[in-house]
């Protein structure tokens, strides 16, 4: 089974929206998603605000990883993984790890990859630990501005 990692294209949008909905469901996130609009105004543009990798098998999207860069005072430039998803029938084929390997190869100057996951998402927590991730004692907050 050949897994190919590519940058997300407009044709991947239906898959990305489906993956986003599944991620929100697993994490028990109950809010209106603006992801469709955000893809159009922030990703499918000449200067995207974030990056998105898609894992394909025989041209079919089976996994995704959405990320951007940020800066931490103590560590410098950091990758923030906003979302990652692999279709259930393609789990245990290494898709998750292929996505992360591609992320590391495309961002060799970054020393830390950071992400958060919902407490109910035990699968992601196990994958991150298996990949060498260390849980931090930080609480994440968000403040809405310009509503």
Image: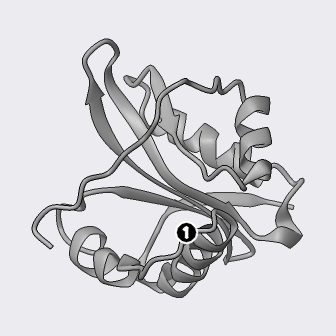
Eyeballing the image, is 131 above or below 49?
above
Query: Does 6 sit left or right of 52 as displayed?
Result: right
Residue 136 found in image quarter: top right
- In the rendered image, residue 138, in percent from the top left (x then y), is placed at 47, 28
Q: Quadrant of the C terminus?
A: bottom left
Q: Nearer the viewer, residue 45 or 33?
A: 33
Colour scheme of the picture: one colour
Q: Is residue 133 left or right of residue 123?
A: left
Q: Work out whether 26 lies above or below 39.
A: above
* Image quadrant occupied by the N terminus: bottom right
Which residue is under mark 1? 29
Q: Nearer the viewer, residue 51 or 17?
A: 17
Position of residue 12 relative to residue 54, above or below, is: below
Instruction: Report whether 46 appears left or right of 75.
Output: left
Residue farthest to the left? 146
Element marked by disc 1: loop
Give the residue displayed 54% in from the left and 24% down from the top: 137
Instruction: Measuring from the top left, give residue 120's x and y in whole percent.
Output: 72, 55
User: Local crowd at mark 1 within 10 Å, few (<14), some, or many (≥20)?
Assistant: few
Q: Determine the residue positioned at 79% across, 51% down.
A: 123
| Number of marks in the rendered image | 1
Q: Residue 98: give x, y in percent of width and height.
A: 69, 46
| Percent position of residue 47, x then y | 17, 61
135 in relation to 53, above or below:
above
Which is nearer the eye, 140 or 109? 140
Q: Residue at x 58, y 78 (%)?
A: 21
Q: Residue furthest top?
A: 74
Snapshot quadrant of residue 97: top right
Front residue (pair 66, 10) = 66
Please report the residue visible at 31 percent of the width from the left and 12 percent of the height from the top. Answer: 74
């Amino acid at each position: 089974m050949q897994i190919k990692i590519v940058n997300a294209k407009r044709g991947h949008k239906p898959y990305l929206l489906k993956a986003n909905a599944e991620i929100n469901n697993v994490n028990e996130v109950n809010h209106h998603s603006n992801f469709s609009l955000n893809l159009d105004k922030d990703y499918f543009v000449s200067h995207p605000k974030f990056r998105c990798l898609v894992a394909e098998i025989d041209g079919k999207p089976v996994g995704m990883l959405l990320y951007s860069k940020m800066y931490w005072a103590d560590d410098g430039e950091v990758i923030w993984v906003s979302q990652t998803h692999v279709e259930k029938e393609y789990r245990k084929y290494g898709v998750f790890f292929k996505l992360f390997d591609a992320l590391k190869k495309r961002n060799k100057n970054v020393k830390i990859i950071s992400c958060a996951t919902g407490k109910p998402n035990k699968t992601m927590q196990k994958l991150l630990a298996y990949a060498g991730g260390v849980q931090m004692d930080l609480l994440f907050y968000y403040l809405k501005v310009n509503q």
